[in-house]
Image (cartoon, rainbow, N blue to C red):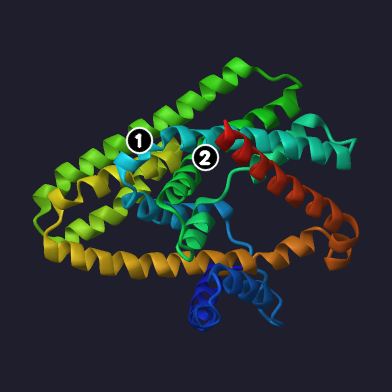
Amino acid sequence: MNTLQLFEIMIAILPVIIGLHYLANRLNLPPAVPLLAGGCLMAFVPGLPAFSPDPELILVIFLPPLLIDGAWGISVRYLRKHIIGITSLAVGAVLFTTLVVAVVTHWLFPSLPWAACAALGAIVSPPDAVSARAVLQQVKLPRRVLMLLEGESLLNDATGLVLFRFAVAAAITGSFSTTQALGSFAVLALGGAAIGAAVGVAWVLIGRRLQDEYLVITSALLVSWAAYILAERLHVSGVIATVVAGMICGTNQYRVFTAAGRVRGIAFWTVTVFLMETAVFMLIGLSLRGVVERIGGFGMALEQMAIPVLWILLALLVARFTWIFLSDGA
């Protein structure tokens, strides 16, 4: 797929997004559901080229703005109040779920090394921040539960990434170091937080001197990519950097924006986030065709992978609920 074809697909999905989102509103469904389904159906439209973009490119384009939008409105006071619960989910739940998934995967595929099973668990255990945010917007939950889920989805990146890296390293070298894993986790999390804080403070200082609403709004959008890319370049957590930068910017927005600037900024962000969020789910669906082709077709997927996938999904759900009930009871 060349660049022109990718652009044409992006334009083609816009009317589909409008129609599917309208349908979701009429049927009172989470928009993510029909958007994913619509993307999957579009992937197999005759004549449409297979959608196979660079995953890293898609990640860096869409993830930072969506993350900073979620972090912008998080109350630092409520975050501090629920930090123990958030840490329990972002670290403890991810670790426990990874372990459970690894055990189930090794039971399903005894010949698969334990390190590879752990790597799979590390990939699927952390709830996705964008998906969690999209679903949470459609339901009414107690503020404590909402804060716990939002906080975890924004901060569990470091745990999953460390687990994955060390699982891959263990598969290659045949050894695992708990001390190194803890050290790597600290570097990822604290390094990302430090870079995010630096970028956020820099925006506050610069934004107060711009004295132009449109420049301030544009600079706020650039903060997300600046924090994410800088952190990733320095090999720390870009997700945590973006979240910390967003919380600092959101806390100090009244010192930077005028009242009119906030109104314009909200309108701009609302439309931008809507387009990006809906496009992400459509693009995920569009990638199904490439996945099916790589594994040998639907027949191969149903014959060899359907049952193991269902077992792993069940393990994820059981592990998640088990951790929540046990930790809440404690």
What is the number of the mark on residue 156? 2
Q: Is residue 171 left or right of residue 262?
A: right
Residue type beneath disc 1: Arg
Query: How many C-alpha atoms fall within 10 Å of the one at disc 2: few (<14), some, or many (≥20)?
Result: many
Q: Please tell me which residue lies in front, 195 or 46.
A: 195
Q: Residue at x 65, y 77 (%)?
A: 42
Q: Position of residue 129 (x, y in %)?
A: 50, 51
Q: Is residue 104 above or below residue 60?
A: above
Which of the two labelled residues, at mark 2 and mark 1, occupies the earlier sequence position? Answer: 1
Element type at marker 2? loop
- Judged from the image, the secondary structure of the residue bearing numbered disc 1 is helix
Left/right placement of residue 198 relative to residue 53 reads left
The spot of residue 148 in percent (x, y) is 46, 44
Residue drawn at x 60%, y 74% is: 34
Q: Residues within 10 Å of mark 1 (few under 14, many from 20)?
A: few
State whether residue 27 is above or below residue 250. Answer: below
> In which quadrant of the rendered image does the N terminus lie?
bottom right
- Position of residue 246 measured from the top left corner of the image (x, y, whole percent): 32, 47
In the shown orientation, is residue 153 left or right of residue 203?
A: right
Residue 131 is tagged as: none
241 left or right of 105?
left
Quadrant position of the C terminus in the picture: top right
Real-space CA distance between mark 2 and mark 1, rounded to the nearest whole angstrom = 16 Å
Q: Amino acid at mark 2?
A: Asn
Where is residue 93? Give x, y as percent. Answer: 60, 37
Please name whichever residue, 151 or 169, is drawn nearer the observer in this view of the structure. Answer: 151
Residue that badge 1 annotates: 80
Q: Quadrant of residue 232?
A: top left
